[in-house]
Amino acid sequence: MKIDVNQLAEHFAQIPFQVEGVYRYATNPGVPNADYTDSFPGFVFPLSGKIQFLFNGMPYILSPGKVVHGGAKMKLDKKVFDNTHWEYILVLYRICNSELEDSSFSHQHFELSTGQSPRLLELIMRLWHVYNQRGGISMFQTEMLFRDVLNEALIGVVNRQSSSESHALFEQVSNYIHEYYHQSLTIASLAEQYNVNRNRLSYVFRSHSGMGPAEYILKYRLHTAQKMLITSDVPVQQIAQTVGIADPFYFSRVFKKQFNFPPTEYRQEFINNPCQLQQASILTQKLNQYTNR
C-alpha cells in the first residue's frame, strides 16, 4: 500500500503515542512464526537478508533500505527467500488517545522506501540497546530515539522521492534540448515550459550533469557543430546557424575555447579524420547518456 509521507508525518506530529516494545529478531528458514501481528501496531526495520511479509494477504518484500508498517492483530504470513538468514528490528507503539486511534494510520499496512541509510541503521540499533536497559532515563531516551528514527526514515523517503522527480525533470528537459537545440532556447523559457523556477532547473542540471542548463545547451550545440565540421563542407556560418548560434563571431570564440582551434582551422586539421570523428561522437553520446543515469 502506498502512503503519503507528508500525511504520515503530520499524523505522528499530532497524535500522542509511545513505544510499547523494541525487539530484535534473527531466524533461519523452517522456524515457526506467529500467525497474527501483535496487539499493537509496529514498524519493521530490516537489518539483513530478504523476507516476504503478508499483512492480511498483502505482500511486502523486506530488505535493507525499506521499512514496513503493520497494524495490530493482522493476519500474518512470512516467506523466506533462498534459504537466507534474515534479521530485523520490530518497534511496537501505542496510540495514547483512544478517540484518535480509530482514524490513525495504526490500522494500516504500508511500506516506506527509505534507501540504505547508515544514520537510520545507527539510530535503530541505539534504540534497541537503550530499550533493553532499565530506569527512567532509558524510558525517556527510548521515546526520544524512536522519534529520531521516524524522522530519519521519513527524510529518507522524501529524499528518494525528490531524487526520482529530479531525474525525471532532467530527462524531460535534456531530451527536449537534444531535439530542439537548433532553436532559440533560454533558461527562462525552459523553466516556464516545465513549470519550475530557474534556480530549481539549474540545481537539477548540476546534480545530474555537473553543469548548468545554459552550459549543457552550449556544449551540445558545439559537439554537434564539431561533427558537422569534420564530416561536411557546409560553411562555418551556416553550421553555426544550424546548431542554434546566430552570431558567427560568438560561435567562433566559444568553439575555440572548447576545442583549442577556431572552426575553420579545426576543419582543416581534422576533416575526415576517423579518430576525431569517433571522439566527437563519444562526447555527444556522453551528453545524451546523462539522461540514463
Image (spheres, helix red, strand yellow):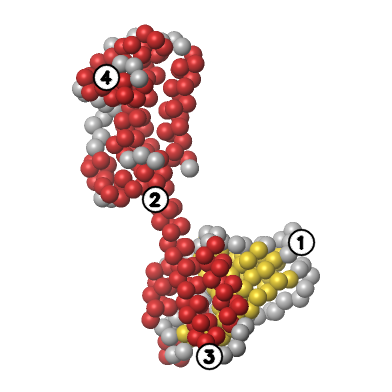
Residue drawn 39% across the image and 50% down it: 166
Instruction: Give the CA distance from mark 4 to mark 1.
Output: 65 Å
Q: Quadrant of residue 236?
A: top left
Circle 1 residue: 83
Decide: few, some or many residues near mark 3? Use Cα within 10 Å; few <14, some 14-19, many ≥20.
Answer: few
Circle 4 residue: 252
Instruction: Give the CA distance from mark 2 to mark 3.
Output: 45 Å
**Which disc is residue 123 wearing?**
none
Q: Position of residue 85 (x, y in %)?
A: 73, 64
The local secondary structure at tag 2 comes to helix
Q: Earlier in the sequence, mark 3 or mark 4?
A: 3
Circle 3 residue: 136
Q: Quadrant of residue 287?
A: top left
Q: Position of residue 268 (x, y in %)?
A: 37, 8
Residue 72 in sight from this viewpoint = no
Disc 3 marks which amino acid? Gly
Circle 2 residue: 166
